[in-house]
Amino acid sequence: VLSDGSLTAEGRDAFIKLAERYGQRVSFYTVPEIQPDVLANVRAVFGVGSLFRLFIPELVYASRVIYLDCDTICNLDMDEFFSLIPDEVVFAGVGDIGISRRKEQRERLSAMRISVDRYINAGVLYMNLDMIRSKFPDFGATVFGYIAESRLPYMDQDALNMFFQYNDAPLILLPDRYNFLVGGTDRPFLPGGEYEGKILHFARDKPWKALYPAAMWYWKYFSVCLGPEVAFDRMCMLG
């Protein structure tokens, strides 16, 4: 768990107890202070917490990680995800269909010399930390530099894709189900079985703000974490 030090003792205890319930353990990392020129270009819709993933190679001494946004639900065994990635790959992710389908975004990325066909959604991101530290030791500083230079519409996601493409970083694109964007006109309303075996990413319509079929997967795991009574009360508040 990455935080800026604002995570309360109560919050830490909740994470620890949840991990212990399933025979797991959780580690906590406090990110360094972010420079003012970067903070000046933070977009409120994403928040400063979106930048914390850029510190992972510096803080986490594992060999490989899969970063997940807080609005994702995993309906698959993550060992399957790791097994897809060859050892020589540094980064892996899923193409952002929300970006690629919009003409104005394709034109924007083209002007930035970014191929939309290799533009990924960074909400689910595989990183080979050993290779980042050895081959791209300035990874974090470079990406923060891109953010400091310009107020990017998709902030660190844009900056990460700039890094991948400007620096020829070994990146592979994964099948859509490893970052299944639940948004638009159809995906929130698919038959229940269509959401199984996927990493669901509620990047647009947040399930804690509105009720719709796909949101039930969020509330299923919310119930597991905090109890069915709490989940029911929260859902009733949404009407």
Image (tube, grey):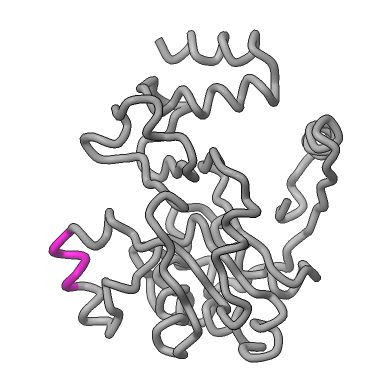
Quarter holding the C terminus is top left
- Image location of residue 167, percent across then percent down: 46, 90
Residue lying at 61% horizontally and 70% vertically, measured from the top left:
127
Residue located farthest toward the left when viewing the structure as drawn? 103
Visible in this render: residue 87? yes
Q: Where residue 213 sits: x, y (%)?
A: 37, 22
Question: In the image, is residue 37 part of the stretch drawn in magenta?
Answer: no
- Is residue 106 located in the magenta-colored stretch of the structure? yes
Residue at image point 61% right, 88% down: 136
Residue at screen point 40% across, 84% down? 165
> Nearest the camera: 103 or 182?
182
Horizontally, is 124 left or right of 98 in the view? right
Locate residue 85: give its quadrant: bottom right
The answer to whether any part of residue 45 appears in the image is no
Q: Nearer the viewer, residue 128 or 54?
A: 128
In terms of image quadrants, where is residue 43?
Answer: bottom left
Q: Where does residue 190 sit, x and y in percent of width and height?
A: 30, 29
The location of residue 116, given as percent across then percent down, is 27, 72
For residue 15, what is the image quadrant?
top right
For image coordinates 49% across by 41% down, the residue present is 197
In this picture, which residue range is highlighted in magenta?
102-107
